[in-house]
Amino acid sequence: MALTESEFKDRWSKLHGGVDVEGVVGGWLSFSYQAARVCTALRITPNLLTLLGLLTAIAMALSTYAAIALLLLVVSLFFDGIDGSVAIVQERDSQWGALLDSLADRISEACWLYMGWRLGIPAWLAITMWMVASIQEYARARMASLGHHEVGVVTVTERPVRAIFMAFALLFYIFDIPGLLVISCVFLALLVFSFLQVMRVISLKLR
């Protein structure tokens, strides 16, 4: 029997450490639930959506037109945003799916910053941004493997915010707005701050 929207939200919340599903989160989950039902009717699996998200991220990185790259970024994020919901609705959430999703996320973010380099962000800056974000996510994953499934802190540079940064970088390029290097440096500082914030919480939990 298919999950109702209420059951879906309840299960999603439990999988994410009891996160509140009201407001913006609740609205997104209502949308993703409906999208998941469509995917289920079309027999589209969550792992296929994960791979589609990765492929569109790669296509974005290789695009020669910034406007098309921006569109591909949005499409990639859509696939990435609903694969977990589809897994819940289809009751296919698995460790393999979680691992595949995590790997796809890291590769996708590398694609974002490769595009950032093509837009004019210095290579050292793009690589450092990716490394800081990736190490932070690795630390979270390692904590989960130790039985701490929620670190208990939401930083200012979570993955959706990193995607928004990439979208702004593309918009700066499309509309020829100066200051990409400045906002990139500021964002790197925020990434480092977020990393230190996560590591502090982790150190307290492991004492």
Image (cartoon, helix red, strand yellow):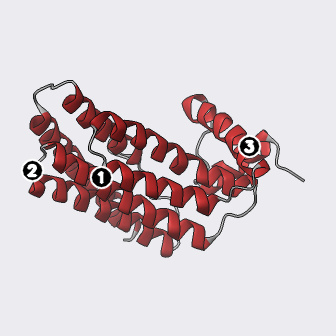
The three-letter amino acid code for the residue at tag 3 is Val
Taking depth in this image into account, of 134 and 149 the one nearest to the observer is 134
Label 3: which secondary element: helix
* Residue at the spot of label 1: 62
The three-letter amino acid code for the residue at tag 2 is Pro
* Residue drawn at point x = 58 percent, y = 45 percent: 19
* Residue drawn at point x = 78 percent, y = 46 percent: 7
Q: Residue furthest right?
A: 1
* Residue at the spot of label 3: 38
Question: Splitting the image into 4 quarters, where does residue 47 fall?
Answer: bottom right
Taking depth in this image into account, of 180 and 67 the one nearest to the observer is 67
Can you tell which mark lies on residue 122?
2
Question: Splitting the image into 4 quarters, where does residue 91 fall?
Answer: bottom right
Q: Position of residue 170 (x, y in %)?
A: 26, 35
Can you tell which mark lies on residue 89?
none
Residue 12 in view of the camera: yes
Q: Position of residue 44 (x, y in %)?
A: 69, 55
Q: Tell me how far mark 1 sits from mark 3, CA to CA.
A: 30 Å
Of the residues tagged 2 and 1, which is closer to the observer? Answer: 1
